[in-house]
């Protein structure tokens, strides 16, 4: 086929328009009708990224979703994770990982080199719980730890180590009550309808796309078993609409490690494709 | 005399170079007394070549002499650097001011930039076919389009997808063929290879962004790219066939090199040592075969790539065998002697090779 100048021009313009229409069409579909979920998040769950490098040049703003995984064992002297990071979770067990599509064929012997042992991360639907039982449990754990450390200090007056641990536990409890994110990833699955049926409250539970990793270990019975960890949420940076940027509320969101943030509350919708967008924001 | 027999600028430039070399050799022959043209013959020959060079310069903007050739190289470098700078400028311009506009305006600006830069490229192309300004404009247009799609994704929090690689590849190919630009051809090839690799990975359930962790997904696209010029002629586009072959070889040998050293990354259900051994043998064999094929078919890029990767595979094996056990001076002496041996081998091959035209 011999292309002349006009054909090339129409092909190029058509390609640009078609690809933009496809992208915007997807956005429209995601935001069509009622959102799949709508969470009222605060400065504890939405954080501004560090302004360094190219970020310094940007006049736009994207907030990072701060999510956590449930913690079972209280660790004296250790803080909980306040900023999102990957990690393992008890609920991400062998059965769950198999349901997510990971190959359940155990590796041959102790050699980690064969294909069965080398599992690559998979995409999965994750359930985000906001200010629910997982957060309540985290609160109970740190309060209980603070109470025990306080009792130990009271029983050992003058012991500097006990005093230090009691203070650390108190600070930890205060951070958990006032600063830590209340957003936890509590479940995963391949089927959105099933997950929504299990977690019907759309103001507390959001379904999002994420990445899950699995590796082989041994279970309590000494048998080979898969254990998993959540690598991240695929869209964890949410662009702040221009109309909300000028507001003091979300516009003053703190950076990581900086002084206390101005409190705000933002409504974040999650659509049909589980992609988020910020609908509104107001100072508290 | 007919300049329209030339299908590409490369062909035209080759003819202009031949004329320049011929003139130089004719002068030396006359000085040595080996050949003497009569005055009418000399005038007729000079007139013929001058007219042909003028037509070639008008139609294909060829370099008529060595000085023009050097200037052309400078212009190519300036064109490339200018495109990089302008592309970066467009990106940072948008990045700095996008926060002051609503989403509708942001999309309009992004879309408008992509459309305008493409239209401008096509307009410049009509004024200066396959010239330096056209190439610069094409690179800027590609940068604007990539920015367009990427930023729309950021503005509306679209889930990252390998599908974005498809329109980027299509656009790069369109601009490459329209403006005779090998750099964009390479960009298009990389995009399509990455897309195929990512898609192949998702079929096994992997999240697409980890496609680099299974290098074998590049091997089949690499082979297809290498063979493509045999089935779809690229004569009208100077250097495109060589670009396909070279990119095909890079996309084949780099994964093989990785797997020859990190067998864990393979799909094959074998132990690591077996995988590494298998890919080392494949690497050596394929590199040698590529050098042989390239010499036979007069494809210099294939010969060079084959020899380079053969040497890399050899040196990595030397490293595995001797780096820890041998004194360092001796290790590097062995590398040097190996290089000398390869030189001797290639000199003998060059002396034995018959002359012929490039395929």
Image (cartoon, coloured by chain):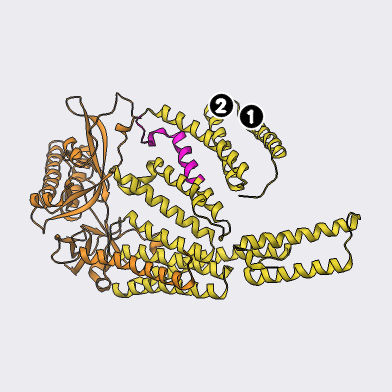
Chain colours: A orange, B yellow
Whole-percent x and y of residue A39? 15, 60
Please report the residue visible at 14 percent of the width from the left and 60 percent of the height from the top.
Answer: A36
For residue B180, which quarter of the picture? bottom right
Please report the residue visible at 73 percent of the width from the left and 71 percent of the height from the top.
Answer: B51
The kind of secondary structure element at disc 1 is helix
Tell me if residue B259 comes above or below residue A14 in the rendering.
above
Tag of residue B322: 2
Neighbor class of circle 1 (other Cα within 10 Å; few <14, some 14-19, many 20+) is some
Q: Nearer the viewer, residue A263 or B114?
A: B114
Tag of residue B334: 1
Mark 2 and mark 1 residues within 8 Å of each other at the beta carbon: yes
Whole-percent x and y of residue B71? 68, 65
Helix, strand or loop: magenta stretch = helix
Span colored in magenta: B249-269
Which of disc 1 and disc 2 is earlier in sequence? 2
The kind of secondary structure element at disc 2 is helix
Neighbor class of circle 2 (other Cα within 10 Å; few <14, some 14-19, many 20+) is some
Q: Is residue A75 visible?
A: no
Q: Nearer the viewer, residue A103 or B147?
A: A103
Whole-percent x and y of residue B230? 52, 50
């Amino acid at each position: 086929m011999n292309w002349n100048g006009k054909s090339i021009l129409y092909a190029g313009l058509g390609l640009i328009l078609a690809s933009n229409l496809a992208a915007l069409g997807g956005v429209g579909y995601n935001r069509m009708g009622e959102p799949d979920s709508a969470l009222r998040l605060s400065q504890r769950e939405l954080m501004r990224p560090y302004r360094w490098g190219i970020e310094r040049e940007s006049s736009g703003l994207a907030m990072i979703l701060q999510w956590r995984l449930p913690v079972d064992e209280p660790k004296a002297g250790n803080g909980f994770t306040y900023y999102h990071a990957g990690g393992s979770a008890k609920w991400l067990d062998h059965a769950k990982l198999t349901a997510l599509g990971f190959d359940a064929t155990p590796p041959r012997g102790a050699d980690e080199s064969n294909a069965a042992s080398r599992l690559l991360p998979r995409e999965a639907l994750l359930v985000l719980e906001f200010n629910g039982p997982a957060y309540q449990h985290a609160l109970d754990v740190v309060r209980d730890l603070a109470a025990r450390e306080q009792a130990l200090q009271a029983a050992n007056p003058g012991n500097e180590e006990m005093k230090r641990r009691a203070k650390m536990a108190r600070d930890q409890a205060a951070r958990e009550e006032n600063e830590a994110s209340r957003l936890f990833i509590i479940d995963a699955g391949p089927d959105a309808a099933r997950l929504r049926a299990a977690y019907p409250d759309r103001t507390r539970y959001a379904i999002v796309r994420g990445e899950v990793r699995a590796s082989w270990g041994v279970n309590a019975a000494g048998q080979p078993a898969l254990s998993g960890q959540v690598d991240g949420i695929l869209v964890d940076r949410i662009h702040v609409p221009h109309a909300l940027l000028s507001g003091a509320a979300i516009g003053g969101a703190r950076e990581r490690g900086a002084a206390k943030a101005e409190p705000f509350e933002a409504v974040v919708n999650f659509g049909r494709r589980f992609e988020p967008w910020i609908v509104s924001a107001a100072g508290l | 005399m007919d300049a329209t027999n030339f299908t590409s600028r490369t062909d035209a430039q080759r003819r202009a170079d031949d004329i320049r070399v011929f003139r130089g050799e004719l002068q030396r022959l006359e000085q040595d007394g080996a050949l003497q043209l009569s005055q009418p013959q000399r005038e007729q020959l000079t007139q013929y070549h001058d007219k042909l060079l003028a037509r070639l310069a008008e139609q294909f903007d060829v370099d008529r002499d060595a000085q023009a050739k050097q200037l052309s190289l400078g212009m190519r470098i300036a064109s490339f650097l200018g495109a990089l700078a302008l592309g970066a400028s467009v990106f940072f311009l948008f990045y700095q001011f996008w926060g002051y506009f609503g989403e509708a305006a942001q999309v309009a600006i992004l879309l408008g930039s992509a459309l305008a830069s493409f239209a401008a490229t096509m307009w410049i192309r009509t004024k200066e076919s396959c010239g330096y300004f056209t190439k610069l404009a094409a690179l800027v247009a590609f940068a604007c389009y990539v920015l367009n799609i990427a930023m729309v994704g950021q503005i509306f929090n679209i889930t990252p997808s390998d599908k974005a690689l498809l329109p980027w590849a299509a656009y790069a190919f369109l601009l490459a063929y329209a403006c005779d630009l090998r750099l964009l051809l390479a960009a298009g090839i990389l995009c399509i290879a990455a897309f195929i690799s990512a898609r192949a990975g998702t079929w096994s359930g992997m999240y697409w962004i980890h496609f680099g962790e299974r290098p074998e997904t590049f091997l089949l696209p690499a082979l297809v790219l290498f063979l493509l010029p045999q089935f779809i002629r690229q004569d009208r586009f100077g250097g495109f066939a060589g670009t396909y072959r070279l990119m095909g070889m890079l996309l084949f040998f780099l994964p093989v090199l990785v797997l020859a050293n990190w067998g864990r990354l393979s799909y094959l259900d074998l132990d690591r040592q077996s995988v590494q051994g298998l890919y080392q043998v494949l690497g050596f064999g394929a590199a040698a075969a590529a050098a042989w094929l390239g010499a036979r078919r007069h494809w210099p890029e294939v010969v060079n790539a084959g020899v380079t990767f053969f040497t890399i595979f050899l040196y990595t094996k030397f490293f595995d065998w001797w780096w820890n056990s041998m004194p360092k001076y001796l290790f590097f002496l062995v590398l040097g002697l190996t290089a000398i041996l390869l030189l001797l081998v290639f000199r003998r091959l060059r002396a034995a090779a018959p002359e012929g035209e490039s395929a």
